[in-house]
Every structure is written in C-alpha cells, then in structure tokens.
Image (cartoon, rainbow, N blue to C red):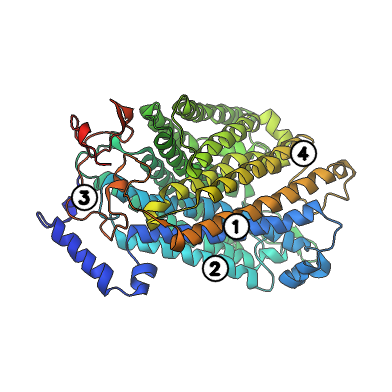
C-alpha cells in the first residue's frame, strides 16, 4: 500500500506544506527536539542515548578490568570517584559484581538493542520504503520515552545505599529472587527489574510500529522484494522482538512475585546462614533459565540482524557492485529468525537436562550456522573484484565480516554439548560472544553512523579520524578477546573477583594485565569517534549534494535536510531493486529511475 493512502487524495503537497509550517515555525525547541513525533528526531534520540550508555558501559568494563589485570595495585583515584566502592584504592567485591552485571545489561539491551535497532529502524524504514513517517508517530515517541525512563531507573540504582544489582546480567535465581542473598539483591534488583520491564514495553511499542509501517506504508512500486537489505534487517529484528520479549516480561513478573509476594515459582529448599530455612518449596530455578534464554538467544539476533542489513547495504554501495544473492540474503535472515527460537537450551547444557534433549539442541545450534555461512559467502563474493571505496563506513563493514567469521567459528565448539561442558562459564564464552555479538554489532552500528550521518545532520564526518578510529578499534578488539579463548580452554572461569589467590590461574596474570591495558587503550580510542560525531554535527563540512555516496535507495532522494514528512510534494515511485550498481555502463541507477531511462540520471 502506498503511504499516500494515509493522506487525502490530491492533498500531498498541501499536507507537506502544512507540516512544514507547523514543524518549522510554530514548534518550540521542546516540542520539536524533545517530544517530537518525527521518526528522524526519534532516531537521533535513540542514537545519542545509546552513545551515552555505551560510554558508561565501556567505562564500567575499564574499572573491573583494572581489578582483573592489577589485583595487587592500589589506585587512590578509585576512592575519589567511587567512594566506599573504591575504598583504599581497590574496587570492592560488591562493586566488582555490580559493575560486571550492569555492564552486561546496558551493553546488550540499551546499546546493542535500543541504540542500534532503535536508531536505524526509526531512521531508515520510512525513508527507504517511501513513507512520510511511522504508522503511529505518537506510539513511536512513546517507545523512546519508555526507553529513556528505563535508563533513568537503571542509572538510579547506582545511588541507592545497597548498590545496583550484582547477580549477573542473566539474573538467575536465587541471587535475583532473594533480597537476603547479597546487598546487590536488595533495592538495586528491584530497580533493575523495573528498568527492564520499561525497556520491554519500549521494544514492543517500537517493534509493532516497525512491522506495521513496512507492511502497510510502502510507496508505489516498492514491493517486498525491492526493499533494501537494511530495511529487511530491522523488519525481521522487530518480528523477533515482538515474539520473544513478552516471554522475558512474564519471567520478570514471576520473579517479582517470588521476591515480594511469597510465591515459589523459582525457589525451593533455600537455607541462608544466620537466618535458617526459608518457607519456599516446589519451585525450580531452571524454569527461569528457560524463560530467560527463550528471549536471550533471539536477543543475540535482535542485536545483530540490523547490523546484517546495514553491512549489506553499505558494502554494495561502496563496492560499486550489486549485492550477491539478494534472495539468499533475505531467506537466510528468515531462517535465522525461525531457528533463533529453537536453540535456547544450548545455554543450559550443564543444567542437568536429558542428554538426548541436549543432542536435539546441538543439531539445531549447528544448523543455524548454515544461514550465517550463506551471508558470509555472499558478503565475500560482493567484495570480490569490487571497485571498493575505503570510507570509514566501508572499513567497519569489512571489519564486521572479519569479526563475525572469527567469532562465529568458535560458536561451533560451544554448540557441541560435550565440549561446552568443559568451556561453559569460562573466558572462552566471553571471547566468543563479545566478538560475534558485541564487537560485530558495534561495528555494524559504527558502519551505519558513518554512512548515514550526512542524511541525519546534513554534514560529513571527518574521514581521517574515522579511519584511525577503525584501525585502533579492530586491532584492540582482537588483542582483547582472542587471548581469552586460550584462557577459557585452560579452564579459567569467568566472574571471579581475584585470580591471584588461585595457583591454577596465577600463571595467566601477565595475559590478564595485557588484556586490561589494551582494553583501556581501545576504550580511550572511542573518544575519537565521540569528538568526530559531536563536532561534525555543528562544524562538519556541509553537504552540497543530496546523494554524496551515489547510492540507489530512496532516502537519498529527499532534501539534504528533510523536514517532517521527508519529501516535498509527491513521494517518488519505485521501478527497480536498490542494487543496480555498475550496470549497463552506469555507475549507479537509483530505484526511482524507470527501466529504459537510465541515461537521464541526475548526478
């Protein structure tokens, strides 16, 4: 259906002119930039909030890496900034576990989910399908403000007397279900639950909007088989989120009942020293694991599916070649969406499950490598003999493929239950998911920001700073996480506060120190991006052409600084797919060019 269907017939120009008057002359700063219903402004809100959380989450990792790399060293400044958490220049045990917990929570949910998909789903969907805005702009605005409220609640947990939740980002019972378990299981846990419940509401509001918009508001000629892969990525991610987040929501509600209303969904036969036996019986902590990982594994793909689409789009544009195997790319993403719901229990091989059932999940886990391998093959084939432009976006695009391959290969080991029993909860797990999910998704996010920044702000980011940022980041990522594979194979467990008291692991002290130093350097390098991003918003080179990358998709047909409504007058009609690069003697052929009129392309 054309997005013009939401307007009165023949009123497209008047509608947009009315929008122009309302949104550019009568709106205050607060209504235009704070409580905006323009999908582009909401995308920027998600992006900047995600960047703030990325800095905070990265800084948390620096703090606990100081403890892991230098357990016997005193840092007096820690007491200055952390107070009782850094007493005597050492991070306390409670602070360490809180930092690791909140780091995992905010990086996975607030940065890689809300920051990545919230930004690019909001920004790209209407622009790339030819729509004035989302299906429900007001609901779209609410999705951001629920996320913002979740952020405030999570941040507030740092200022309660007992501190933030400290039971791990997966929040397994009984640490999460019993306030008596530890100081970090008290008020901080309630705030953690409240924050993530608000976050789930945000994701459901956004996801329903994205799905409705793609299905119902495409412009004339924009069939599903002509959608850019970047739109396919966020569309399928939204479907995953809408189907899986309610399960996590229900798990959290049961957890709240166990914590405050005397139920025993997850608790049974609990004894606390100094308190005695608690009146819980009949519950099962494994139930929570099933509910959590039914969201938890699709969450991996919720974080990386938008990156799949962004990388495919940027790669084709900068390789000046049609994307290889468009249909295979779409079908492989469909296969990932289906299989993502069938592999959750591979996180639970050591929970005592029936070995036969475990073998079923081994098969399904290894099977999901097939569509991922198809995507990798298609990316490499797209790059092969391409006329590559090494923009910062393209560098992060190629870097994404690199870390996705190297991180993904280790997943084959973890998917085998016999091997996973040995490496479960070791540094091997940390290395794997940080590469294949964390670093890869962040590279997809950087790739998208560098590529669509001109469309977001009408200015260009500095390419030299972008290239320096890429090289430090990719080298740092490999130097941090590759050695962790060897530590994990040697049996080094994760989540330990101090390894120096263990004879088995003291031999890895220098490796831990090396990882910590590189982590600090790599984190510091991200301030190059921050400077480049915020400086370029105000001082970057202004665009003089609507289409600086000579790309084919619809967003580059809007004005340099599009208003609320995106196009002045009629929305363009689509006549072809978005990947006609280097075809019939033309460097690029936009989607709006009718077949047979390629010679009339405007530069």
Residues at circles 3 and 1 in contact by the CB criterion of under 8 Å: no
Residue 94 position (above or below residue 453): below
What kind of element bears circle 4? helix
- Disc 3 versus disc 1: distance between alpha carbons? 40 Å
Residue at point 68%, 38% (across, down): 350
Give the camera-side residue of 308 and 174: 308
The residue that mark 2 highlights is 153
Between circles 3 and 2, the one closer to the viewer is 3
Between circles 4 and 2, the one closer to the viewer is 4
- Left or right of residue 539, residue 502 in this image: right
- Disc 4 versus disc 2: distance between alpha carbons? 36 Å
Give the camera-side residue of 308 and 301: 308
User: What number is the disc on residue 3?
Assistant: 3
- Disc 1 versus disc 4: distance between alpha carbons? 29 Å
| Mark toward the start of the polypeptide (3 vs 2) | 3
Q: Position of residue 421 (x, y in %)?
A: 71, 34
At label 4, counting other C-alpha atoms closer than 10 Å, the crowd grade (few under 14, some 14-19, many 20 or more) is: many
Give the camera-side residue of 410 and 25: 25
Residue 178 position (above or below residue 379): below
Between circles 1 and 4, the one closer to the viewer is 1
The residue that mark 4 highlights is 487
Q: Position of residue 426 (x, y in %)?
A: 73, 41
Q: Position of residue 411 (x, y in %)?
A: 61, 33
The residue that mark 1 highlights is 527
What kind of element bears circle 2? helix
Query: Residue 85 occupies which quadrant of the picture?
Result: bottom right
């Amino acid at each position: 259906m054309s997005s013009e269907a939401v307007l009165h017939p023949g009123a497209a120009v008047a509608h947009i002119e009315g929008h122009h008057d309302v949104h550019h002359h009568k709106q205050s700063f607060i209504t235009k930039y704070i409580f905006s219903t323009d999908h582009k402004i909401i995308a920027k809100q998600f992006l900047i909030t995600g960047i703030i959380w990325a800095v905070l989450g990265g800084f948390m990792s620096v703090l606990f890496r100081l403890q892991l790399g230098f357990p016997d060293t005193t840092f007096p400044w820690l007491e200055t900034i952390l107070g009782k958490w850094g007493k005597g220049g050492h991070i306390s045990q409670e602070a360490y576990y809180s930092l690791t917990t909140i780091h995992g929570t905010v990086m996975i949910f607030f940065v890689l989910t809300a920051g990545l998909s919230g930004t690019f789903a909001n920004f790209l969907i209407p622009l790339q399908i030819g729509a004035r805005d989302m299906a429900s702009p007001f609901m779209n605005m609410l999705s951001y403000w629920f996320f913002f409220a979740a952020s405030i609640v999570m941040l507030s947990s740092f200022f309660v007397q007992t501190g933030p939740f400290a039971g791990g980002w997966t929040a397994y019972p009984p640490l999460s279900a019993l306030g008596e378990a530890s100081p970090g299981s008290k008020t901080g846990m309630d705030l953690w639950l409240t924050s993530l419940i608000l976050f789930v509401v945000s994701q459901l509001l956004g996801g329903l909007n994205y799905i409705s918009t793609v299905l119902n508001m495409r412009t004339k000629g924009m069939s599903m088989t002509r959608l850019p892969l970047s739109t396919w990525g966020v569309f399928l991610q939204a479907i995953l989120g809408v189907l899986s987040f309610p399960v996590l929501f229900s798990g959290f509600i049961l957890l709240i009942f166990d914590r405050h209303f005397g139920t025993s969904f997850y608790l049974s036969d609990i004894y606390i020293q100094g308190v005695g036996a608690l009146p819980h019986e009949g519950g099962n902590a494994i139930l929570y694991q099933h509910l959590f990982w039914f969201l938890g594994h699709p969450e991996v793909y919720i974080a990386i599916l938008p990156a799949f689409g962004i990388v495919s789009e940027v790669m084709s544009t900068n390789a000046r070649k049609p994307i290889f195997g468009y249909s295979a790319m779409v079908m492989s993403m469909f296969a990932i969406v289906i299989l993502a719901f069938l592999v959750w229990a591979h996180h639970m091989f050591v929970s005592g499950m029936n070995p036969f059932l475990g073998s079923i999940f081994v098969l399904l886990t290894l099977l999901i490598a097939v569509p991922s391998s198809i995507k990798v093959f298609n990316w490499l084939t797209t790059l092969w003999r391409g006329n590559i432009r090494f923009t910062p976006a393209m560098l992060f695009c190629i870097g994404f493929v690199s870390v996705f391959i190297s991180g993904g290969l280790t997943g084959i080991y973890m998917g085998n239950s016999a091997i996973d029993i040995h490496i479960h909860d070791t540094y091997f797990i940390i290395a794997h998911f940080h590469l294949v999910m964390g670093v890869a998704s962040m590279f997809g996010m950087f790739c998208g920001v560098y590529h669509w920044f001109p469309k977001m702000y009408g200015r260009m980011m500095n390419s030299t700073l972008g290239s320096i940022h890429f090289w430090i980041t990719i080298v740092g990522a490999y130097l941090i996480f590759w050695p962790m594979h060897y530590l994990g194979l040697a049996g080094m467990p994760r989540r330990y506060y101090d390894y120096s008291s263990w004879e088995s692991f003291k031999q890895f002290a220098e490796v831990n120190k090396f990882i910590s130093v590189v982590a600090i350097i790599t984190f510091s390098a991200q301030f190059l991006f921050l400077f480049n991003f915020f400086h370029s918003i105000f001082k970057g080179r202004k665009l003089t052409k609507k289409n600086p990358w000579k790309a084919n998709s619809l967003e580059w047909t809007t004005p340099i600084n599009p208003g609320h409504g995106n196009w002045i007058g009629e929305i363009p009609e689509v006549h072809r797919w978005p990947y006609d690069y280097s075809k019939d003697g033309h460097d690029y052929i936009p989607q709006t060019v009718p077949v047979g009129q390629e010679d009339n392309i405007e530069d």
